[in-house]
Image: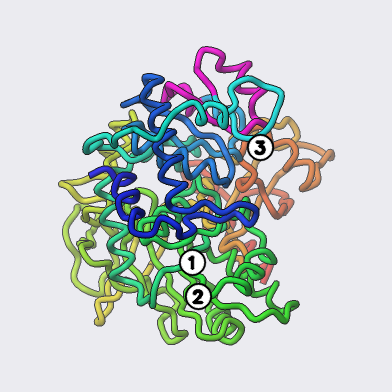
Amino acid sequence: MNLAEHILERAVLVPHRIAISDGHEDCTYEQLTKRVQQVASGLRQGGHTNQTVALLSGNRMEFAEFVLGAIYAGCTPVLLDPKWSPAELEQVIQQCAPGLIVSEVCFAADLIGRYSGIPQLYFGRGQVSGSYEAWVAGFGPEAEAADSPELLFIGYTSGTTGIPKGYMRTHQSWFSSLEATEKAFSLNRMQHVLAPGPFVHSLSLFALLQSLYSRATFHLLPEFDAERVLTLCSRVPDMILFVVPAMTEALLRQAESSNAEVSIQALISSGGKWPVSSIPKCRERFNGVRLYEYYGSSEASYISYLELTGAEPQDSLGQPFSGVELLICDEQFREVPQGTVGELYIRSDMIFSGYHLLPEETARVFRDGWLRTGDYVYQDRQMHLRLAGRAGSMIKSGGLKVFPEEVEAVLLRHPNIREAMVFGIPDERWGEQVTLLIQWQGQERLTLDEIRKYCRPYLASYKLPKQLINVEGFSYTGSGKIARQLMKSRVVEELT
């Protein structure tokens, strides 16, 4: 079934309830239904059915209605990240070959010049042709939903080289995920939802659709702002927040300087482990809040979850969601005994269907129908998953993936840099802080701000180093590679 169609069918029961509120404008379910069907009519009459349609935008009302309208019409929305460098954006647009690009008007000048052969529409006011609002107004709400389209959308995650790669999610995979939320989390009732992260990341987009699927009110913020989040939670009762750990830390810091009484029913966190010290602070500051953490990925969706009480082991990932099968294997894909560390494979109706136009990458993460997570875990006697370590050298900073090799490749282009190594240091705010070791060629050295400025045309902002450490030399392995773990251990020891 078409997920957007299902959401609109459920909306019929609550036509006058607020579906989305951005603090300036409220959109009822009746109004949202009309707008979604107008968007779908426009896309169909424009010949975009069964095409990919690219969306480059921050969080806004139009983002939500366009994504739903595209899904309803049988198109496949492709989510482009405004934080990408021009090179990353170019690569993704060339790969997905969209029949239409929809963006905020601030991107118009660049997009018109580079992609003049692709039709374009723009959110917001500006002196350019292609007004999204005028386009929508030209169509009636008479569109019928596409019957059982396979793909829901294409999102992007970094590859092992840092190059964005598209993960394809189906309607069925998100139907199963939406149902899993209702089964796993003990929520009194989902009435108000807030996910202040970017919609282009699956966590916030999922929370938006979960809210609409549950006929709740989604409170939209253009970006994360701890003060605004707490203000909303003081005005709106029983808020359910979908967050990453860095957001929770910012909310706690903000709460220390505020006397406002907030009403948070639940904090549902993903993208990394919470600092243990935060759990009692959350319970004390946000009275009555239920704290949940879940383990998953853009490719896997939900894997496991637990309610945080402060008594659970720090490395616990909880128990699997309903319908998730686990297989923990050695390097020969043989199942290991309980309590033994191995690589985690999963199987469920919630996993993705593959990487867009990357069959070899897709084949690497599937084995006999099982999805390879790349994480090393074991199960304890209570059958809880326990994290032993993450595969490779990937950094998770603020819930986002950063691959050191990509950052290092940019840095080593600079003539003053002889050698560079990027790694993550545990950080209560970011989860991991992107840290840089540099050996210079000569006497001339750059500051951290100068390095960040140098990297910005090539890297998304969250990939930029947050700490710089100068070194006289590196240790190397027998094969001539940097001894990463040894170097990291030395730095961490010196810093502590």
Mark 2 and 1 residues: CB-CB less than 8 Å, in contact? yes
Q: Residue at x 62, y 38 (%)?
A: 459
Q: Is residue 94 magenta?
A: yes
Which residue is under mark 1? 192
Q: Who comes first in sequence, dot 3 or dot 1?
A: 1
Rendered location of residue 255, percent (x, y): 68, 76
Q: Residue at x 74, y 41 (%)?
A: 451
341 displayed left or right of 34: left
Q: Is residue 155 visible?
A: no
Q: Who comes first in sequence, dot 3 or dot 2?
A: 2
Task: Specify few, some or many for label 2: CA neighbours under 10 Å numbering under 14, 14-19, or 20 or more.
Answer: many
Task: Specify few, some or many for label 1: CA neighbours under 10 Å numbering under 14, 14-19, or 20 or more.
Answer: many
| Residue type beneath disc 1 | His
| Residue type beneath disc 3 | Leu
3 displayed left or right of 412: left
Residues in magenta?
A: 91-120
Which residue is under mark 2? 238
Which residue is under mark 3? 411
